[in-house]
């Protein structure tokens, strides 16, 4: 999703800017129409990908080839289905970037936690809690005759230095849980994208494709 989203975004953005800039020389309008045609074909390609990779049934609308070339071109440019396909192709970049970043960070963190028992003696491992690291001192004092006897102990809150195998195993177990949550959320993201594709990829072709 992420590589295709980058490709779609750059193609549509660069193509539209180039076509708008070339309107004054007479070839900008044909380039814009060609960009709409390309968006429709890419939408058909995305329907195939969603059906095969996400197992979501995205129906292919029948081609609308009736009317003259001008009327079909006008329907292509003004149809809400065409614009929905363009929005879908552009939004794939944004959605893919968020999902890719989440998966990359989640999997990398999970794997580093899982392997903690193998490297905790060579590399320091520190786990930080939800509060900033800070120290506090506990003083226990009591008087006896003319003497003042007490115990002073300094504690550190907000972090945990892992120095034992038991602590590394706890971190490894946390890595298993984090990996499970990451995969579960990625599966949920894929299901949401499949529903989104079914809603947005409804544009038909306005031309015929020869059967080879």
Image: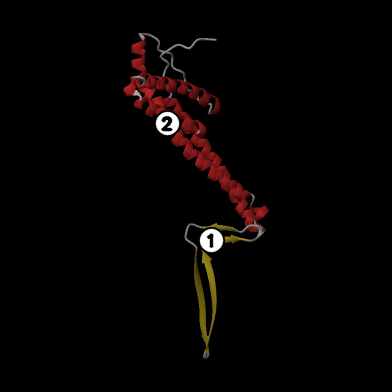
Along the line of sight, which residue is nearer the eye, 53 or 30?
Answer: 30
Along the line of sight, which residue is nearer the eye, 91 or 69?
Answer: 69
Tell me the residue at 52%/25% (across/down). 49
| Badge count | 2
Vertical relation: 17 (above or below) 207: below
Residue carrying label 1: 159
Relative side of 211 to 67, left or right = right
Q: Which mark is residue 198?
A: none
Residue 34, by quadrant, is top left
What distance separates the C-alpha of mark 2 from that of mark 1? 42 Å
Q: Position of residue 211 (x, y in %)?
A: 52, 10
Along the line of sight, which residue is nearer the eye, 150 or 175?
Answer: 175
Q: Is label 2 in contact with label 1 (beta carbons under 8 Å)?
A: no
* Label 2, residues with CA under 10 Å away: few <14, some 14-19, many ≥20: many
Secondary structure state at the residue bearing disc 2:
helix
Residue 21, by quadrant, is top left
Relative side of 195 to 107, left or right = left
Vertical relation: 139 (above or below) 71: below
Residue carrying label 2: 90
Q: Position of residue 7 (x, y in %)?
A: 48, 30
Tell me the residue at 61%/47% (across/down). 111
Tell me the residue at 64%/50% (across/down). 115
Can residue 177 be seen in the rendering of this structure?
no
Residue 33, by quadrant, is top left
Can residue 125 be seen in the rendering of this structure?
yes
Tell me the residue at 51%/73% (across/down). 138
Q: Position of residue 130 (x, y in %)?
A: 48, 57
Secondary structure state at the residue bearing disc 1:
strand
Q: Earlier in the sequence, mark 2 or mark 1?
A: 2
- Quadrant location, the C terminus: top right
């Amino acid at each position: 999703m992420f590589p295709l989203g980058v490709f779609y975004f750059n193609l549509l953005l660069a193509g539209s800017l180039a076509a708008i800039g070339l309107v004054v020389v007479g070839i900008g309008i044909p380039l814009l129409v060609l960009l709409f045609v390309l968006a429709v074909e890419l939408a058909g390609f995305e329907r195939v990908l969603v059906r095969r990779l996400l197992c979501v049934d995205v129906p292919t609308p029948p081609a609308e080839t009736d009317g003259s070339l001008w009327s079909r071109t006008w329907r292509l440019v003004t149809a809400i289905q065409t614009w929905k396909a363009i929005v879908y192709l552009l939004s794939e970049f944004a959605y893919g970037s968020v999902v890719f970043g989440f998966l990359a960070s989640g999997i990398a963190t999970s794997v580093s936690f899982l392997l903690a028992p193998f490297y905790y003696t060579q590399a320091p491992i520190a786990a930080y809690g939800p509060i900033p690291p800070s120290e506090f001192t506990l003083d226990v004092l009591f008087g006896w005759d003319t003497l003042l006897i007490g115990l002073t102990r300094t504690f550190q809150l907000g972090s945990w230095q892992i120095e034992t195998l038991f602590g590394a195993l706890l971190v490894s177990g946390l890595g298993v849980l984090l990996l499970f949550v990451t995969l579960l959320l990625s599966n949920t993201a894929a299901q949401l994208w499949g529903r989104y594709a079914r809603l947005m990829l409804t544009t038909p072709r306005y031309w015929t494709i020869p059967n080879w």
